[in-house]
Amino acid sequence: QKEVEQDPGPLSVPEGAIVSLNCTYSNSAFQYFMWYRQYSRKGPELLMYTYSSGNKEDGRFTAQVDKSSKYISLFIRDSQPSDSATYLCAMRAYTGGFKTIFGAGTRLFVKA
Amino acid sequence: SAVISQKPSRDICQRGTSLTIQCQVDSQVTMMFWYRQQPGQSLTLIATANQGSEATYESGFVIDKFPISRPNLTFSTLTVSNMSPEDSSIYLCSVLGSGNTIYFGEGSWLTVV
């Protein structure tokens, strides 16, 4: 079993839809949770970062962490064609040294 | 967040040759990392570049194949040695920033023919 599971998609939605992207994980030591957006032929760009459980909102983006269920989500409201990209979740734990694990990424297409 | 510049941004190389990728950060950072992202795959950590000492390699990566230098707190290089088509990948320089998050450069797209 992988430490972080993420559905690779692709996920195709119409413009204006609410998008839900999810990751599950198995290591309860993860404390820092991140979402990255990666456009084609570009490096990953940090979108959201949360520490421990709870919600965090930034504009059209909301990150949720449920540590009891080992489940994190990224919601995108009023999705735009410019949101079409691959979204990677990432998690970080301190286990004698920092360890970061990335999900496989979900490809999102927002159709105009 | 730090601004991370990588050179070259892309290259096509002959098998058996070596290529050095440079990473420049606009501020001093303690921890720098090199990742590989193969086509359609997620990010795999190659090594942590330690300033003034040998890099710390992850399982499956060795210094002879991926020598790394880190002469100061703003600069690092990764060399991909004796390249084969299997080395065709994106190589990403990254740093540990505020909040223990990782920031990436734009990547170096390498195609080995």
Image (spheres, rainbow, N blue to C red):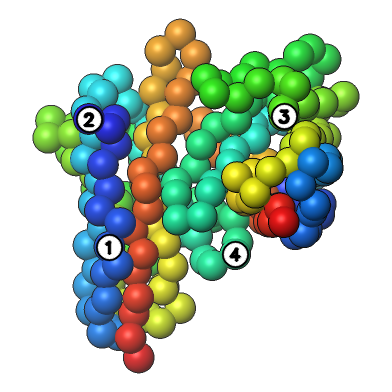
User: Which image quarter: residue A52?
Assistant: top left
**Both on one chain, marks 4 and 1?**
yes
Q: Is residue B49 above or below residue A41?
A: above
Give the left or right position of residue A73, taking residue A32 as reference: left
Percent x, y of residue A32: 38, 32
Number of residues whose C-alpha sits closer than 10 Å to that of mark 4, classed few (under 14), some (14–19) or many (20 or more): few
Q: Nearer the viewer, residue B82 or B26?
A: B82
- Residue at screen point 78% across, 19% down: B51
User: Which image quarter: residue A94?
Assistant: top left
Q: Is residue B71 above or below residue B1?
A: above
Determine the CA span between mark 3 and mark 1. 32 Å
What residue is pinned by disc 4? A41
Give the left or right position of residue A105, taking residue B26 as reference: left
What residue is pinned by disc 1? A9
Percent x, y of residue B62: 66, 21
Q: Secondary structure at mark 2?
A: loop
Q: Secondary structure at mark 1?
A: loop
Total residue callouts: 4
Q: Chain of mark 2?
A: A
Q: Secondary structure at mark 3?
A: loop
* Residue A51 in view of the camera: yes
Query: Is the Cβ of the residue at disc 3 closer than 8 Å to that at disc 2?
Result: no
Numbered mark located on residue A1 in the image: 2
Q: Nearer the viewer, residue A5 or A98?
A: A5
What residue is pinned by disc 3? B66
Numbered mark located on residue B28 in the image: none
* Residue B23 in view of the camera: no
Number of residues whose C-alpha sits closer than 10 Å to that of mark 1, classed few (under 14), some (14–19) or many (20 or more): few
Image quarter where the C terminus of chain B lies is: bottom right
Q: Nearer the viewer, residue B81 or B56?
A: B81
